[in-house]
Each structure stands twice: as structure tokens, then as C-alpha cells.
């Protein structure tokens, strides 16, 4: 993790920064654009690698997260599960 505070967590991947931001903090960064609500549709999915998809699904369930799908073995050789974050974005965990 590159940076973290109460409103965001920033990760660096090569020359790319990914800022996971609370929607309440987003207007200050994207104004004059509007912050989209969670019911406006999905335009991206962020996949996070984990060591054990099933174990991580148990942790997510303990924290009140409802899975959209999975865990499931995909035909291309990985095991995945997906869920929606509080902002409405789809997150996938994969091994």
C-alpha cells in the first residue's frame, strides 16, 4: 500500500496508482464531474489475488459481505469469487 487514510487506500502497480476512495470523499477529487451512485451500473471490475479464495470468502462472509458468485473454478484455470463493494463496484478475488 502506498498511502492510506480514513477516506482512501492507494496502491501502486508499476507506474499506475489505484485509489480506492470513499464516495463521500470523491467530489473533492473529481469535481465538476458527478459521483455515480451504486445503482448506475458496473463499468469495471478490480481483481485481487489471494492465496485461498475459499478462506477469503469465509472472512468476507464473517464481515457481512454477500457474494455475487463463487467460489467457482473458471474454465481458464483460476478460482474466483465476486462481490459488490459499498460504492457499487464489483471486486473479484482470484487464485
Image (cartoon, rainbow, N blue to C red):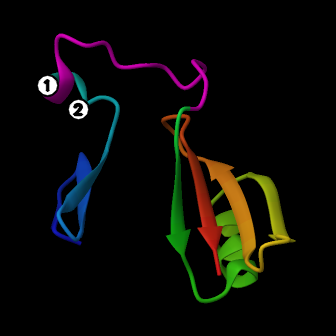
Residue picked out by circle 2: 25
Magenta stretch, main secondary structure class: loop
Q: Residue at x 85, y 69 (%)?
A: 72
Determine the secondary structure under disc 1: helix
x, y percentage for residue 26?
A: 25, 29
| Dot 1 crowding, Cα within 10 Å, few <14, some 14–19, many 20+ | few
* Disc 1/disc 2 C-alpha distance (Å): 6 Å
Do labels 1 and 2 touch, CB within 8 Å? Answer: yes
Residue picked out by circle 1: 28
x, y percentage for residue 28?
A: 14, 25
Q: Residue at x 81, y 55 (%)?
A: 69
Relative side of 14 to 93, left or right: left
x, y percentage for residue 25?
A: 23, 32
In the displayed structure, 44 sits above or below 20; it is above
Q: Residue at x 59, y 31 (%)?
A: 42
Give the total number of marks visible in the rendering. Answer: 2
Relative side of 60 to 79, left or right: left
Q: Residue at x 43, y 19 (%)?
A: 36
Relative side of 5 to 47, left or right: left
In the displayed structure, 76 sits above or below 95; it is above
The stretch in magenta equals 29-42
* Image quadrant in which you'd find residue 65: bottom right
Amino acid at each position: 500500500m502506498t498511502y492510506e487514510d480514513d477516506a482512501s487506500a492507494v496502491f501502486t502497480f508499476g507506474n499506475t496508482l489505484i485509489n480506492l476512495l470513499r464516495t463521500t470523499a470523491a467530489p473533492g477529487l473529481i469535481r465538476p464531474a458527478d459521483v455515480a451512485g451504486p445503482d448506475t451500473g458496473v463499468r469495471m471490475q478490480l481483481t485481487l489475488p489471494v492465496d485461498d479464495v475459499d478462506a477469503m470468502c469465509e472472512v468476507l462472509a464473517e464481515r457481512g459481505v454477500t457474494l455475487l458468485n463463487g467460489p467457482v473454478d473458471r474454465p481458464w484455470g483460476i478460482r474466483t469469487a465476486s462481490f459488490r463493494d459499498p460504492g457499487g463496484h464489483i471486486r473479484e478475488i482470484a487464485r
